Image: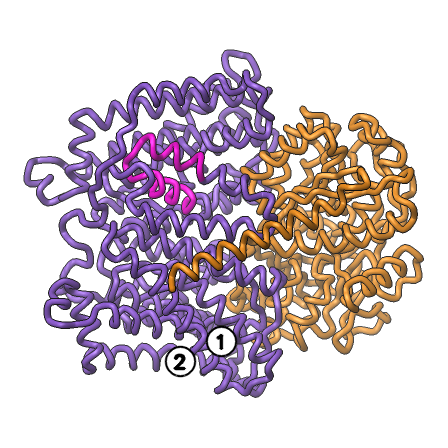
Chain colours: A orange, B purple
Amino acid sequence: MSNINRRTLVQGSLAMMAGAAFSRSAFADAEPILLGVSGPLTGPNAQYGTQWKQGFDLALDEITAAGGIDGRKLAYQFEDSQSDPRQSVAIAQKFVSDPKIVLELGDFSSPASMAASPIYQRGGLVQFGFTNSHPDFTKGGDFMWSTSVSQADEQPLLARYAVKSLGLKKLAVLHLNTDWGRTSRDYFNNAAKEYGAEIVVTEGYIAEERDFRSTLVRVRDANPDGLVLISYYSDGALIARQARQVGLKQVICAASSVYSPKFLELGGEAVEDVHVGTRYFPEDPRPEVQKFIAGFKKKYNGLEPDAFNAYSYDAMNMAAAVIRIGGTDRRAIRDAFAKVKDVPSVIFGTATFDVATRRVKGAMNAELVVRKGQFALWDGKPT
Amino acid sequence: MSSWLDYTINGLIVGNVYALVAVGLALIFGVSRLINFAQGSIYLVGAYIGWVAVVQLHTPLPLTIILVAVVAALVGLIIERFGLRPLQNSVRIAPLLATIGISFVLDQLVMLTFSPNPRALPSQLPDVRFQVGGGTIGPLDLLIAGVGITSALLLFVFLRYSKLGWAVRAASQDRDAAMQMGVDVNRVNQAVFGIAAALGGVSGMLVGMYYNQIDTAMSLQATLKGVVAEVVGGAGNVPGAVVGSLLLGLVESYGVAVFGTSYRNLFAFLLLVVVLVLRPNGLFASARQAPPEPLTGTFIAPSRPLRIPCWALSAAVAVFAILPLLPVSFYVLQTLINAWLLGMLALSLTLVAGTIGQVSLGHAALLAIGAYTSALLSLTLNLPVGLAIIAGGLMSAALGTILISPSFRLRGHYVSIATLAIGEIVSLVILNWESVTRGPIGISGIPPLSLFGYDLISPASIYWFAFAVMVVLALLQARLLSSHLGRSFRAIRDDDIAARAYGLSLNRYKSLAFIFGGFAAGVSGGIAAHLYSYINHETFNTQQSILALTVVILGGLGNVVGAIVGAVALVGLPEVFRIAAEYRILIYGIVLLLLVRFRPQGLLGTI
């Protein structure tokens, strides 16, 4: 009995391996231009890797349908790093020494991404970190480029929404205690103070946290008139639910990273009337947004795209635009990042790199609110 | 004042949630003296079965609970039959490793079946809220409390008054004697695993409903908090586990009240260390209770180590030394650099865990101390990198030994739990001590490795550097093991009472082992910091500690060559399985299980 069990397990996994290998080789026959992706497919951040893939695949479909790049297909090789620096450095060496890889995308977390940066820099392969908001990421060298929305840009927009538009004067800030959350919090607090609000309490929580009731008692005792969540969608939904459960009725404002259909699903009624500053919204008339949302829903059976889908979709389109200019030479590709102009983008409208910081400035802004379980453009009415 | 009432209520509510996991862990520990790391995975499975039942099958709540309990119990029985029973006559530590492997496999299976995206698990109870203090509680809070307390009481009565319960307790006190008295130990184990797994599954589902959220990352956190609560209450003591959980919830809640949210887990783990130091058997162990671990060293069974001839070792070292001159890719070199760095950590752990018997589950903390020391010294004082790394090793040796010294009086599993807590405490201090460690922002721009003014930038030079350091540390350790010091270490491991009777000072020798081990781990961390150029509190996490222990057990406890072979295997295998993409960690888990099954004493055997 036990033997049969083990054997079938092994056979099953072998079959799965073969399947995985096969689906990859299907790309290879047309000699595509190959990008390397280093990101989490397993481990605690696996969900973000799957979301990247959805955005990449949609962008690639569109690029292929438009004839590829000079008649060649664009494809990517996704290596699972589990967002672990030990694995991302090995992947970096793998990509750097593989002449087929012309450009690298990722990694997800700062420790994994920035540990690999020296290898990409020395190896002369562009590391295009499209979710890397850590202020020091692009300081790793001239091969580090990022389309991650700079928190110096994003947080003042959220602060303006909370303080100027919603008229909140005493804010409680809850933030994910990671490099992203901390940086964001500092930019947010500074901007909110400049707009004339007072930050009555800030609380940082670790990513694994699920119970926020005691934190929310602290928040209640500080007597704010609004809560600001610098969170991802899963923890943001948890906080909103528990805030309502412990009887906090204040206005809740959240950063764009909660913008996901999952936020609505996980938060349920508790996220009703939550205000979210985002970079795009479903009814946005911009053609690139409409194309993205329609294409995404069509490809993924009606699924609504979220912020991370948009980041990866934009990143793949940016990669294609850069390769159209720079060709397949790694150095020429790096130089092309400085030349590429006004690439249509869901997040930025049109994206052009600032050569000094190697980042893109000026993200779009939309002020949304959850109404009847859907994200809708805020109508200016107080909640 | 009313806030304190709210903090108390909130503490009790979350303690409630911990209790569900802790009771299952306590039950299993009570019988098989095993910390079941797979309990969190069963909890995860239960949550997803619950999701299928509620969202797909639309079952009513009682049926959902029964369905989850039955499926989870089946999973528990399968684990017991195929994962643990074959190991019952092997080394005591093998089942521990097996549960880690099983939890990898279960977590991955759930992730592959349901995708890693979090899901909503709607509660099936009516949505009414009762005002208590400043906040409200719902029917689910009461249900969770009810399930926790009822199951603890039922189990207590079952263990005290039923025949099978007597058998369970007899088996837990003395397995061989119970067998002689005609107790079918396997049936007892089966019963216990079935009950514990059913409870674990139901608790996963209830907690999922409570937060309206389930995801595949919830397993490890559940295990960690459950273990803390269980040990605080007294390992193996079922009602104690409930009280321990409530206490843990309260301490966390008050910790948040006084110091703020980011200190929360710090208090959880400090509570654990304090309880372990003051009352090593937990708060509710009676004074008459027999010590939970056997007095003599059956925890790490002796085995015949595989002797590797000297010429073969020299040849292997020579081959690896000239490897960069051969046409191998940088990727292979980088993978081996990772293996050498992990090898240094494994050398350190194999000394403290294998040779002197202090199985540490917090070894990543030593890496972190070495890495931060070296990074900060080279950045702020412009110390040459080579010196900074040595300073990192020394700091790790000193600080690590001081931090771990409270656990010297503990035995067996309790050492592992205490070191696990100390590891978490170090990581949380790094997160919160912003003026020195820069908190979550981390340290960037750490200078690259250099030696005597020459930067080591090419993969080959980094490879040689890491390899040379590791070989030197390994030779030192081999010399140490063959000296009289090494024999004293092993004497303490095998029988600490006899060792003390011979006049060996336990604390002094344990300190010596941690000083040497801490240095090796600190050097490894220091090199890693300069290699990565950026570190933060997440760089050296609990998974690293578990990986290091896996390496050490795989290679053979106390075995110097085994530690290095294990490191190469466990760094290499996931890389080899890259072709399998999402499936690679699943395959890795299965391979690990097979290795434990067929070589429980490790590849090269315990020395």
Residue shown at the point (72%, 69%) measured from the top left = A274
* Residue B475, above or below B4: above
Residue shown at the point (30%, 47%) measured from the top left = B600
Are callouts 1 and 2 both on one chain?
Answer: yes
- Farthest residue, direction left: B501
Of residues A204 and B368, which is closer to you in this image? Answer: B368
* Residue A150, above or below A119: below
Q: Are marks 1 and 2 in contact (CB under 8 Å)?
A: yes
Q: Which residue matches tag 1? A: B206
Question: Tag 2, which chain?
Answer: B
Q: Main secondary structure of the magenta part?
A: helix
Q: Is residue B420 visible?
A: yes
Q: Which residue matches tag 2? A: B147
Q: Is residue B11 visible?
A: no
Specify the segment rendered in magenta. B545-569
Of the residues shown, which amino acid type is indicated by label 1? Leu
Of the residues shown, which amino acid type is indicated by label 2? Val
